[in-house]
Amino acid sequence: MSSSDAKRLTLPFDRTALRELRAGDECLLSGPVFTLRDAGHMRLLQELDEKGSDELPYGLTGQAIFYAGPTPPAAGRPFGAIGPTTASRMDFAAPRLHDAGVAATIGKGVRSQEVKDACVRNAAVYFVAVGGAAAYLAKCVESTDTLAYDDLGTEALRRVEVKDFPVFVGVDTYGNDVYDLA
């Protein structure tokens, strides 16, 4: 990815800026993302069910959830590696979380029609991060803080500050899918 061609986005997202993105656009993200995977999603949905509302805890409204399980610190960085996991594993939770206010998700691979519909309904975006580049992506992490579910280890909810984190728009706010463009 050439940084001169990439759209630079600061998180949390401005929904107007998300509407300007198109499937396939190269982007560099800077600001907070929140890591969460399968078990963490189940725990978050359970919290929402117990509260009887879809008001997101932990400051997740308007934020990006990164489907990643980072490794321990290494080479003087907060993580030795942090790479995307297969996004479709979180399709069971993504529509509800988008409806509750999550602005974007980051992972790898295709998404279900239900997730695409939720992106359209909520002016949300799915970003694709390159798999197999976890050590490189860790160089984009400036700091991290565990917010919840520490007992889940790598699947805990973490706030991760990134700078120039490279992604592509996988599904835009209009439901266009980069995998359909190939």
Image (cartoon, helix red, strand yellow):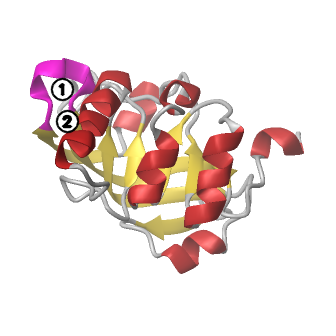
Quarter of the view holding residue 54: bottom left
Image quadrant in which the C terminus is located: top right
Element assignment for label 1? loop
Crowd tier of the residue under label 2, counting other residues whose Cα lies within 10 Å: few below 14, some 14–19, many 20 or above: many
Percent x, y of residue 168: 63, 49
Q: Which residue is mark 1?
A: 73
Q: Which label is found at residue 6?
A: none
> Is 168 situated left or right of 43 in this image?
right
Q: Which residues are magenta?
A: 148-156
Q: Earlier in the sequence, mark 1 or mark 2?
A: 1
CA distance separating discs 1 and 2: 5 Å
Percent x, y of residue 80: 28, 25
Element assignment for label 2? loop
Label 2 amino acid?
Pro
Q: Which residue is mark 2?
A: 78
Residue with the most extreme bottom position: 16
> Is 21 situated left or right of 57 in this image?
right
Label 1 amino acid?
Pro
Q: Are marks 1 and 2 in contact (CB under 8 Å)?
A: yes
Visible residue check, residue 177: yes
- Give the residue drawn at x 30%, y 46%: 34
> Is 57 situated left or right of 91 in this image?
left
Visible residue check, residue 6: no
Percent x, y of residue 121: 61, 63
- Give the residue drawn at x 68%, y 63%: 5
Percent x, y of residue 68: 38, 30
Q: Report the predominant secondary structure element of the magenta stretch.
A: helix
